[in-house]
Amino acid sequence: MKMMSPSIDTPSYYDSYPPLLRPNNNPIHDLNQDLDNPIPNPNPDPIPVIDFQNIDNDAISEACRNWGVFRLVNHGIPDALLNQLRGRAEEAFSLPFDSKHALKSCTAMAYFWGTPALTPTGETVERGPTPPADVKWLEGFNVLLNQLSQQLQVEDPVLDNFRLVLDEYGRHQSRLATTIFKAMAENLNLDQNLYESYLSPSTASMRIYRYLKCPLPVWGLNAHTDSTVLTVLTHDEVGGFQVCKGDDEWIDVEPIPNTLVLILGDLIQAMSDDKYKSVKHRVKANKYKERISVGYFVFSAIDAVIQSSKYKPFTYADFRAGVQQDLKTIGYKKVGLGHFKLTHASH
């Protein structure tokens, strides 16, 4: 006997969805779909695991060189805060679409949907009419942590409670990223005067994603690398996040409670002279359940010059400008580090 969820499939619930992605407004949705939840049978994935309370520099180096991604356990973030984070995110996403859309121009916590192509302040990059195939089954909040303590422009207790939890969570993320990057910098023998500007928590932002249910196989996020030094990801029990090992081996990253996933970005690949890998990753939408994830993105100081034997010297401002140009013209990051690659790099 098929069991239907009485709460998630009522019209009032879908008022929280962007109008284009509501079942009645999009031809690919079918409310008569079989919405039985499949019995999960995850196989343990081979992603390396790093214990934050007993950091092993050699283990970090191996994970960075061979994978570009690892799990972080014993990270010191209280379980209660992680539970609050998930709960407040669910509350915020369940608000009517119009309430969230009012935050589109709010720089501290800007709402977006249908695309991950955003400006540095979190606004959707405009590039003309978007073909339906380019619309992603997601919505989210882009949070600028250095502005989050300011009063939101929209008075809403749900969003204000969410802001307070995000502010606290962001402080933990800064602590983790700074400590992990210090171990990486030691492994790479980076000059201390450099690495203090190579990772700047003042640049950090967070994106909170809700990947919406979709009965057909679609990508919530296409394959890409992050334009960061480091990305720290926490996600709920719903799978769909994948990383690429080597050239084309895609691996499902199983969601394990109270663990974080740390992803290396383009900037640290350049700092490491390509010894560390900026790992490609993607997200597949789920036909049965929504998926919520929180990404913490941290960069170099905007004017810090990244020195490398493989790339021309460049600042994060230079790198960001190239990425923004790609987003405006084609809707995704195409070139990235290739803008600065030396033709005859030293070995």
Image: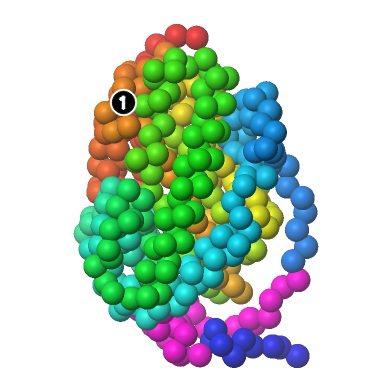
Identified at 36% across, 65% down, the residue is: 113
Q: Position of residue 315 (x, y in %)?
A: 30, 27
Taking 56 as reference, is 38 above or below it?
below
Task: Label 1: state its secondary structure.
Answer: loop
Left or right of 187, for residue 267? left
Please rate how many residues cluster around mark 1, counting C-alpha atoms within 10 Å: few if below 14, some from 14 to 19, many from 20.
Answer: some
Of all residues, the one furthest to the top in this rendering is: 346
Taking 173 as reference, is 29 above or below it?
below
Identified at 59% across, 51% down, the residue is: 77
Colour scheme: rainbow
Q: Is most of the magenta stretch helix, strand or loop?
A: loop
Q: Position of residue 56 (x, y in %)?
A: 68, 28
Left or right of 237, for residue 182? left
Q: Amino acid at mark 1?
A: Ala
- Find out whether residue 30 is within the magenta segment: yes
Identified at 24% across, 67% down, the residue is: 153
Which quadrant does the N terminus fall into? bottom right
- Quadrant of residue 338 in the image? top left
Query: Count the marks: how many?
Result: 1
Decide which of 314, 214 is in the foreground and name it: 314
Residue that badge 1 annotates: 304
- Find out whether residue 145 is within the magenta segment: no
Q: Position of residue 159 (x, y in %)?
A: 38, 70
Q: Position of residue 97 (x, y in %)?
A: 35, 78
Whether residue 238 is visible: yes
Identified at 44% across, 89% down, the residue is: 12
Decide which of 119, 198 is in the foreground and name it: 198
Left or right of 336, for residue 279? right
- Quadrant of residue 127 in the image? bottom left
Whether residue 218 is visible: no
**Which residues fall within the magenta stretch?**
10-39
Left or right of 60, for residue 114? left
